[in-house]
Amino acid sequence: MKGYQLKRPMSETFLVGAMLTIVGGYYDAYTYIARGGVFANAQTGNIVLCGISLAEGNLWKALSYFIPVIAFVLGIFTAELIHKTEKKTPLHWRQIIIALEMITVVIVAFLPTSAEKHYSTNMLANVIISYVCSLQVQTFRKVHGITCATTMCTGNLRSGTDLLVRYRSSGNKQELKDGLKYYLVNVFFLIGAIISVFLTNSFGSLSVLFCLIPLLLVFALMFMRLP
């Protein structure tokens, strides 16, 4: 009798994708509630807010929105550099990304919040979360056969709706299934945001530590490899 075999890499299974998407939604609600009303995953919003601040002549506020964008870009570079070490380390390169994400989550949890004198630490926390989100979105780009993002919803909503519209014309059930997968991924993002609201309101900045639970599970699951 043959042993159990995965149909796809563990990093692309719906279980891993769902947990990472919950984390992505959690991050966004966390930074909005506990870190000064910023969506750390939404760089489009940060660029727009940066432009508004520049137009108003508020350079410091503009910088607070621009730095997370730079951090997001640096995260993409980091992920690709780590990817190049794939054959040089005992861990899978995606496990290294998850380990780095867990370390940064702990750092963010213990940065001070709320008071005006701590505004700079809120900005630092948002920069770190932006960096982490770019690591995650660059590293885990497929969920159960579809190419999607685990830290944002707009692209998933577009792709899912496009497939559902195409299904109406073609009757291709695979397009229907894939379209619904995109919507389900966004549901998990919403779940993560809802959980974050309750935990952040209860535990403040430390609530981001709850993200370690799904991240640890993903790290452990990554030890399951294709034969």
Image (spheres, rainbow, N blue to C red):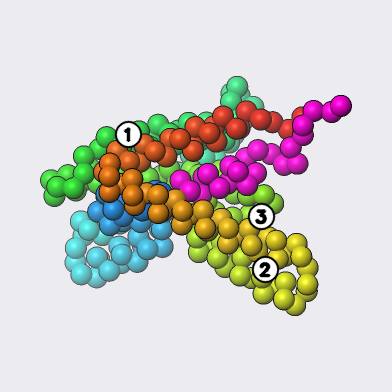
Q: Amino acid at mark 3?
A: Ile
Q: Nearer the viewer, mark 1 or mark 2?
A: 2
* The stretch drawn in magenta includes residue 5: yes
Spot occupied by residue 210 in the image (x, y as percentages of width and height): 39, 38
Q: Which residue is mark 1?
A: 107
Marks 1,2: beta carbons within 8 A: no
Q: Amino acid at mark 2?
A: Leu
Q: Which residue is mark 2?
A: 163
Of label 1 and label 3, which has the lower sequence position? 1
Q: Secondary structure at mark 2?
A: helix
Q: Amino acid at mark 1?
A: Ile
Predominant secondary structure, magenta span: helix
Q: Is residue 135 left or right of residue 3?
A: left
Of label 3 and label 2, which has the lower sequence position? 3
Query: Would you place residue 92 above or below residue 164 in this image?
Result: above
Spot occupied by residue 197 in the image (x, y as percentages of width and height): 34, 52
Query: Would you place residue 89 above or below residue 113 in this image?
Result: above
Q: Secondary structure at mark 3?
A: strand
Image point (72%, 76%), residue name: 168
Q: Which residue is mark 3?
A: 146
Query: Would you place residue 133 above or below residue 43 in this image?
Result: above
Q: Is residue 74 visible?
A: no
Query: Would you place residue 163 above or below residue 30 in this image?
Result: below
Task: Tell me which segment is drawn in magenta.
Answer: 1-25
* The stretch drawn in magenta includes residue 49: no
Q: Residues within 10 Å of mark 1 (few under 14, many from 20)?
A: some
Alpha carbon separation for disc pair 1 and 3: 32 Å
Q: Is residue 225 visible?
A: yes
Spot occupied by residue 129 in the image (x, y as percentages of width and height): 37, 45
